[in-house]
Image: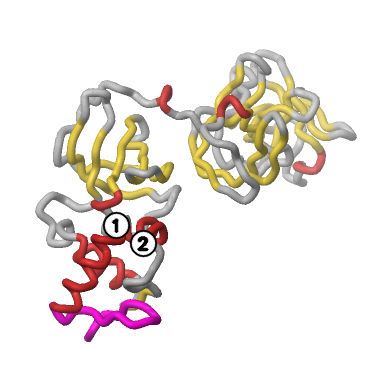
Amino acid sequence: MQQSEYLELGKINTLFIDRLTTPGAYLMAKDGNDVLLPGQYLTPQMKERTFVDVFIYTDSEDRLVATTLTPTAKLDEMALFEVIDTAPFGAFMDWGLSKDLLVPNMFQKTPFKVGEKRFIRVIYDERTHRLVGTEKLGDFFERKVKGIKIADEVNILIIAKTPLGYKCIVEDKYEGLIYHNEIFENINLGDRKKAFVKDIRKDGNIDLNLRKAGSKKSGSSADKVLELLKQNNGIMPYNYKSDAELIKDIFGLSKKDFKRSLTALQDAGKIEVKDTGIYIKD
């Protein structure tokens, strides 16, 4: 193992076990600074004068502390977190460590609620010298798109649902969007997928399609309804009377387009619509 030069907050450090004490093990970097690994994380294999990989963050008293646990995301990384508590000054996210990750109010786009899942980036707060989370990701995206052109296949990460569609991180550095009316499959926050570049806008944002241009399944609203049905074993509990907002959330369609699609598919003999839902015909 290569010993870390110095203690790095928010990152995995490889440190030398300098001494074992009642509270735990004191781990040292090359520059001579040390940090406590609490006893609850010690294993029989951890001996003095050996090395161990740990994540470093701060405890409730803002002291550096080490853990052998790996958080949901490290410094400058992004991930989907669950809100486990709220306070007047911010919200607390579960990130797999004994001390929860705080997202201050100033770093929230809208108020957080317990049980929600939000896409968060872990950052270093210069004011408090702590690791915190932020939902405001715009400043972290690169605005000059390089090495990507229209029709290219790219890697994306779904990070948020908006009225227009789903926001994505493209190739870990750019901001992208898939419009609701061009989604032909179920997608969820945190999904990693392949997509195709539809347009690169002047502001650096990238419009995306999940299917390559010209794909048989990338056309009409009726195709979209049929594709979702196939992905759900040919049955979905919706019909002409279903709530418009529900239709928008599930199918990404207006109520008018949804009803028109059902009629077109029924006329083509592809589906049957009942009070209990939509059924694909054999």
- Report whether 244 appears left or right of 44: left
Quarter of the figure with residue 281: bottom left
- Report whether 91 appears left or right of 243: right
For residue 163: magenta? no
Whether pointer 1 and pointer 2 mark residues with C-beta atoms closer than 8 Å, the reply is: yes
Q: Which residue is most to the bottom?
A: 282
Query: What type is the residue that disc 1 sits on?
Result: Leu
Query: What type is the residue that disc 2 sits on?
Result: Ile
Kindly identify which residue carries mark 1: 253
Q: Which residue is most to the left?
A: 214
Mark-to-mark CA distance, 1 and 2: 6 Å
Towards the viewer: 13 or 113: 113
Kindly identify which residue carries mark 2: 247
Secondary structure beneath disc 1? loop
Task: Please report the residue visible at 19 percent of the width from the left and 74 percent of the height from the top.
Answer: 265
Q: Position of residue 176 (x, y in %)?
A: 31, 37
Mark toward the start of the polypeptide (1 vs 2)? 2
Q: Relative to residue 100, is residue 268 depicted above or below?
A: below
Which residues, given as a range, are shown in magenta? 268-282
Q: Quadrant of the C terminus?
A: bottom left
Badge 2 crowding class, 10 Å Cα cut-off, few under 14, some 14 to 19, many 20 or more, is some
Q: Position of residue 77 (x, y in %)?
A: 49, 33
Towards the viewer: 39 or 110: 110
Q: Quadrant of the N terminus?
A: top right
